[in-house]
Image (spheres, rainbow, N blue to C red):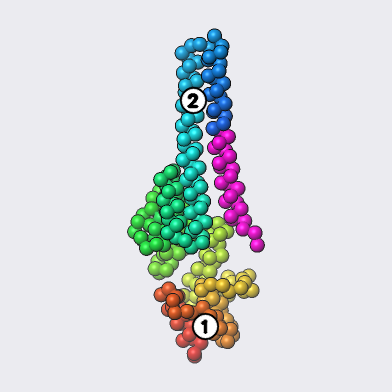
């Protein structure tokens, strides 16, 4: 299946960079034109013509410097996301940190905050995510919303997790993960029938991770398919599961024994 999200990200990056340097090219051409006119046309030998040439030149230099720093930030941010998705969090944090130093904006601050949170520096990570949201006048980015929502979910702070996860589901990258998390929340409240309706379009999707295995095992158990439910529990309920999943799978084991 083609990576539409990755393709869109690359196109947006390319168009953004092309736009910046096209504007720089226009100002450089205008500055050259003004200097040539001032030096070669006697009628243009005046203070006004000189000031215009100097002003446009300075503006072109500023645009060039800002474009270079912004491009470096975009480059480091892009490769930081690649490292993040490959679960190389220390490398991702280093790249996001370099991106922020080159051009501090809401995205670079938020990306660094997510990495810090996942690496265990929870307070600083959440503070940076909040700062990124403030820089957007209260608007979060799907990347930040999803990982803060996931953190709130693992801590049982459902009332805080739900709006963040709902917001992040606008991005197709996170939609499937959000569907699974909401299904788990429903199962925690014993609303199995609601989960069955919610997951009906995904019943044939291959089970590849813990949250999906928990959901499918719960649904199969509710449908009386104990052998299939037991198979999923045996395969995914390993000893190194996070605490929140250990308790859920332990609950399933007890139900399977009844």
The correct choice, above or below, for 3 with respect to 237 in the image is: above
Residue 29, given in percent of the width and then of the height, sits at 57, 26
Can the viewer see residue 165 in this picture?
Answer: no
Q: Earlier in the sequence, mark 1 or mark 2?
A: 2
Please state which of residues 198 and 203 is positioned toward the viewer in this rendering.
203
As for residue 97 lying within the magenta part, the answer is no
Q: How many marks?
A: 2
Question: Which is closer to the viewer, label 1 or label 2?
Answer: 2
For the residue carrying disc 1, how many other residues have a C-alpha within 10 Å: few (<14), some (14-19), or many (20+)? Answer: few
Label 2 sits on a secondary structure element that is helix
Is 12 contained in the magenta span? yes
| Location of residue 108 in the rendering, given as x and y in whole percent from the top left corner | 44, 49
Instruction: Mark 2: give few (<14), some (14-19) or many (20+) Cα within 10 Å.
Output: many
Residue lying furthest right: 1
Residue 185 picture location, percent across and down? 48, 71
Extreme residue toward the left, this view: 123
Q: Residue furthest bottom?
A: 258
Does the image show residue 232?
Answer: yes
Q: Residue at x 50, y 29 (%)?
A: 60
Q: Tell me: 122 left or right of 175.
A: left
What segment carries the magenta color?
A: 1-23
Q: Secondary structure at mark 1?
A: helix
For label 1, the residue is 234
Q: Main secondary structure of the magenta part?
A: helix
Relative height, residue 114 to residue 184 (above, below): above
For the point 45% across and 56% down, the residue is 92
In the rendered view, would you say 132 is above or below 190?
above
Q: Nearer the viewer, residue 167 or 69?
A: 69
Residue 32 quadrant: top right
Query: Circle 2 is placed at which residue position?
Result: 57
């Amino acid at each position: 299946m083609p990576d539409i999200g990755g393709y869109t990200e690359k196109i947006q990056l390319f168009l953004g960079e092309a736009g910046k340097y096209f504007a720089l090219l226009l100002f450089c051409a205008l500055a050259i034109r003004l200097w040539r006119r001032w030096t070669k046309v006697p009628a243009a030998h005046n203070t006004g013509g000189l000031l215009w040439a100097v002003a446009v030149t300075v503006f072109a230099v500023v645009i060039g410097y800002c474009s270079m720093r912004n491009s470096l930030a975009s480059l480091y941010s892009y490769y930081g996301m690649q490292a993040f998705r490959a679960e190389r969090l220390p490398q991702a944090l280093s790249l996001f940190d370099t991106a922020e130093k080159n051009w501090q904006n809401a995205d670079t601050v938020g990306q660094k905050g997510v990495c810090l949170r996942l690496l265990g520096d929870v307070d600083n990570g959440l503070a940076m995510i909040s700062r990124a949201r403030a820089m957007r006048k209260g608007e979060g980015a799907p990347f930040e919303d999803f990982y803060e929502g996931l953190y709130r979910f693992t801590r049982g702070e459902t009332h805080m997790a739900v709006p963040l996860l709902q917001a992040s589901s606008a991005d197709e990258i996170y939609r499937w993960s959000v569907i699974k998390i909401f299904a788990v929340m429903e199962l925690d409240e014993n609303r199995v029938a609601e989960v069955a309706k919610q997951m009906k379009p995904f019943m044939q999707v291959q089970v590849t991770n813990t949250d999906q295995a928990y959901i499918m095992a719960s649904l199969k158990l509710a449908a009386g398919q104990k052998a299939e439910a037991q198979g999923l529990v045996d395969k995914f309920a390993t000893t190194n599961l996070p605490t929140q999943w250990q308790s859920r799978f332990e609950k399933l084991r007890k139900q399977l024994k009844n």
